[in-house]
Amino acid sequence: MNIESYISQLLYRYQCVTVPGFGAFLTEIESAQLIESSHSFFPPKKVISFNSHIKNNDGLLANHIAQAEKTSYEYAVSAIQYEVFNWKKALQEHGLFSIKNVGTLSLNADHNLVFTPSDQTNYLTSSFGLSAFVSPVVKRELFEQKIEALEVNLEEEEIIELIPEKRRATAYLKYAAVFVLGLGIAGTFGYPAYQEHIAQETILVEKAVQKKVQNKIQEATFFIENPIPAVTLTVKESKMSYHIMAGAFREERNAEIVFKKLSDQGYKARRIPQNKYGLYPVLYGSYATFDEAEKAKQEIRNTINPDAWILIESL
């Protein structure tokens, strides 16, 4: 059975697709890119990476194969194991092999796996139908020619000179002189009355300000004598969204045995209800932050289970 197509199908829907006993393919969304030097545009996409340390069977790939092939879960697990055996054999004999529409895996000089993702398929469903394209350079030669022609036409147009009539300007000056003379006479007799009016307005404003200040003082005194009752705030308990997986079991009694064993060993073990794949997950413990979960995972890997991994619940 060729499981490559099933891995490719799951990468459209999930962030992590684990191949039991081999490793996990991870996806991360990359924003759209514009390369100005080449006038190239690339739509948003999912970038695929590979982690050889995540090898536990989470049931995702096996259940998907079992449903697609209409076969048993156990047969699907066996098919995956056989395919992984062929992959490892190809690495030993040829040093590399390719997974269609996913990428190429090879061994470097230190015999470590190196993954090169394929750029032929965009697994981001929201970018369906979008492809990279190169925009042609915008040419502005025609526009510049039109501007030059317009400037030449403006230079050739006849300049019109406006000459004001002397008689009309003289009339304006006469009326302005009469207006200025009137202002001088009014200022001589009306200035003392204007000063008295300003003084009265100032007194009224000062009285209004003093009244507002007194009202504010009374309001402040009222609040001091009648203090506002204390407010009790309820702090929301932080969500335990980071779990360290101990395993997922087809039989519930096996999950219960592992749960009791971990509890006896001092772990804050937990059981999660049966998932949609029919498995019963068992946890070493749950944590509020990723740093706490990462620290606990390292301790578990160094002492009891080198394949322990973190399950991140959707926030």
Image (cartoon, rainbow, N blue to C red):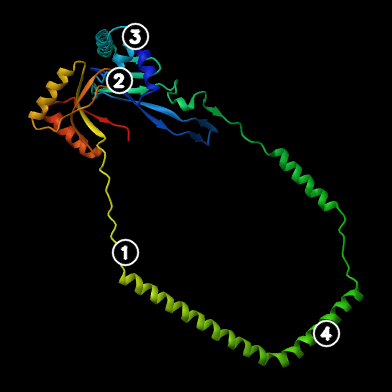
Q: Is residue 211 left or right of residue 141?
A: left
Q: Which residue is mark 2?
A: 276
Within 10 Å of disc 1 (Cα), the crowding (few <14, some 14-19, many 20+) is: few
296 lies above or below 119: below
**Amino acid at the residue labelled 1:** Ile
Q: Residue at x 85, y 77 (%)?
A: 172
Q: How many marks?
A: 4
Mark 4 against mark 2, which lies toward the viewer?
A: 2
Circle 1: element type: loop
Q: Which residue is mark 4?
A: 178
Earlier-in-chain disc, 4 versus 1: 4
Percent position of residue 177, x then y: 82, 84
Estimate the spatial distance between the alpha carbons at disc 3 and disc 1, rounded to whole Å.
72 Å
Earlier-in-chain disc, 2 versus 3: 3
Earlier-in-chain disc, 2 versus 1: 1
Q: Which residue is mark 1?
A: 228
Estimate the spatial distance between the alpha carbons at disc 4 and disc 1, rounded to whole Å.
69 Å
Q: Which residue is mark 3?
A: 2
Mark 3 against mark 1, which lies toward the viewer?
A: 1
**Amino acid at the residue labelled 4:** Val
Percent position of residue 15, x then y: 35, 26
Circle 2: element type: loop
**Amino acid at the residue labelled 3:** Asn
Mark 4 against mark 1, which lies toward the viewer?
A: 1
The image's mark for residue 86 is none
**Amino acid at the residue labelled 2:** Lys
Earlier-in-chain disc, 3 versus 1: 3
Estimate the spatial distance between the alpha carbons at disc 2 and disc 1, rounded to whole Å.
53 Å
CB atoms of marks 2 and 3 within 8 Å:
no
CB atoms of marks 2 and 1 within 8 Å:
no
Earlier-in-chain disc, 3 versus 4: 3
CB atoms of marks 3 and 4 within 8 Å:
no
